[in-house]
């Protein structure tokens, strides 16, 4: 029998206890200098500059019905499995290209 894995959301998590709230407030009040980072050193500004924003971002997919020219669909399918993903990648590339000039101004 297959079991469905359920990811917790803020709505499904149990409420925090008073002790948990108090502990979180104490942690929030700690000055940065008193935090022990000996087991995991802080990252330098240089290390942060190499970071990539949104590397593991996965947009939510939405099912649609779209009409595509038959020759375009044939071409996409002729490239092998995953034609819908390729179609999405082509659309995303064009979307991002059209947004670049708008960001510069």
Image: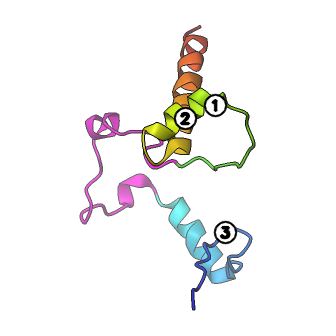
Image marks 2 and 1: residues in contact by CB distance under 8 Å:
yes
Give the quadrant of residue 103. Answer: top right
Q: Residue at x 54, y 60 (%)?
A: 29
Front-lying residue, 48 or 56: 56
Mark-to-mark CA distance, 2 and 1: 6 Å
Q: Does the magenta stretch include residue 35?
A: yes
Mark-to-mark CA distance, 2 and 3: 41 Å
Q: Residue at x 26, y 35 (%)?
A: 46
Magenta stretch in the rendered image: 31-57
Coloring scheme used:
rainbow
Mark-to-mark CA distance, 3 and 1: 42 Å
> How would you classify the magenta stretch by its main secondary structure?
loop
Helix, strand or loop status at disc 1: helix
Per the rendering, the mark at residue 74 is 2
Image marks 3 and 1: residues in contact by CB distance under 8 Å:
no
Which of the marked residues, 3 or 1, is nearer the chain's N terminus? Answer: 3
Which of the marked residues, 2 or 3, is nearer the chain's N terminus? Answer: 3
Q: Mark 1 points at which residue?
A: 70
**On the picture, is 42 further left or further right than 103?**
left
Per the rendering, the mark at residue 9 is 3
Q: In this view, does 76 lie above or below 33?
A: above
């Amino acid at each position: 029998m297959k079991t469905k894995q359920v990811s917790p959301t803020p709505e499904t998590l149990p409420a925090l206890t008073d002790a948990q709230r108090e502990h979180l407030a104490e942690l929030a009040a700690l000055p940065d200098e008193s935090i022990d980072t000996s087991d995991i050193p802080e990252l330098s500004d240089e290390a942060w500059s190499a970071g990539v924003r949104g590397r593991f971002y996965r947009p939510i997919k939405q099912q649609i019905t779209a009409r595509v020219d038959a020759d375009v669909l044939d071409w996409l399918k002729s490239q092998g499995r995953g034609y819908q993903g390729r179609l999405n990648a082509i659309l995303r590339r064009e979307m991002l290209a059209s947004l670049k000039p708008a960001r510069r101004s």
